[in-house]
Every structure is written in structure tokens, then in C-alpha cells.
Image: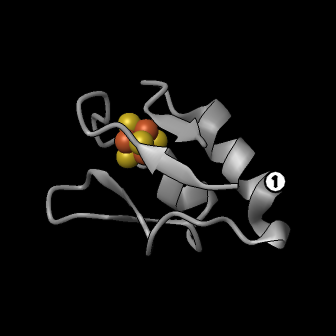
Amino acid sequence: MKVRIDPQRCQGHGRCYDLAPDLFGEDDEGYGQVIGDGTVPQDQEHAARLAVSNCPERAIEIL
Ligand code: F3S
């Protein structure tokens, strides 16, 4: 499993990096960024899905 953030959709709500800090970080302006290449370790899959379902802009995709 991999995650990506659509930069066109992200408005910087920050739920992703609050809920799944091992998978997402923020850039200088508070927009979400995936950490590394976005690969989700098995023990982080629940956190990844939580981030996807909590992003108000539906900016996070699971690949
Ligand atoms: Fe952006 Fe959604 Fe995270 S708007 S900062 S991807 S919660």
C-alpha cells in the first residue's frame, strides 16, 4: 500500500499529519506531504485509512 496527497486538493487542514505522523508531515506552509515515497508499512495501514477518511478535501489517495 502507498499513499499520495493531491497538492491541488490539499488545503492544509493537517488531519493527516496529526492522525498518522509516521506517514505524513507538513511543508513550511502547513500543507501535507507524504514522508519518503509514501509506502505504508503494514502496521500503519489503519492510520493511513484514518487519514484518508478524515481529510476534509479528500486529498489523500491510497494507491
Ligand atoms: Fe491536506 Fe487533507 Fe492533510 S487537506 S494537510 S491532506 S488532512
Task: Name the element at disc 1.
Answer: helix
Q: Image check: 9 left or right of 16?
A: left
Residue at image position (78%, 57%) is 45
Location of residue 46 with respect to 37 vertically, above or below: above
Residue behind mark 1? 46
Q: Of 54 and 4, which appears nearest the observer? A: 4
Type of amino acid at the residue the image marks with label 1: His
Give the quarter of the image for residue 61. Answer: top right
| Cβ at disc 1 under 8 Å from ligand 1 | no
Instruction: Please give left or right for residue 38 compared with residue 63 in the image.
Output: left
Q: Quadrant of ligand 1?
A: top left
Q: In front here: 1 or 35?
A: 1
Which residue is pictured at 49% across the width and 60% down the height? 17
Say left or right for 17 vs 32: right
Q: How many marks?
A: 1
- Indicate the quadrant containing the N terminus: top left, top right, bottom left or bottom right: bottom right
- Residue 47 in percent (x, y) is at 73, 56
Q: Residue 23's spot in the image, x, y percent?
A: 56, 67
Q: At 35% across and 37% down in the image, what residue appears? A: 6
Q: Which is more toward the observer, 21 or 48?
A: 48
Q: Height in image: 24 above or below 16?
A: below
Compared with residue 19, is residue 49 higher up or lower down, i.e. above or below? above
Residue 21 in the image: state x and y as whole percent: 56, 69
Q: Quadrant of the rendered structure where residue 44 is?
A: bottom right
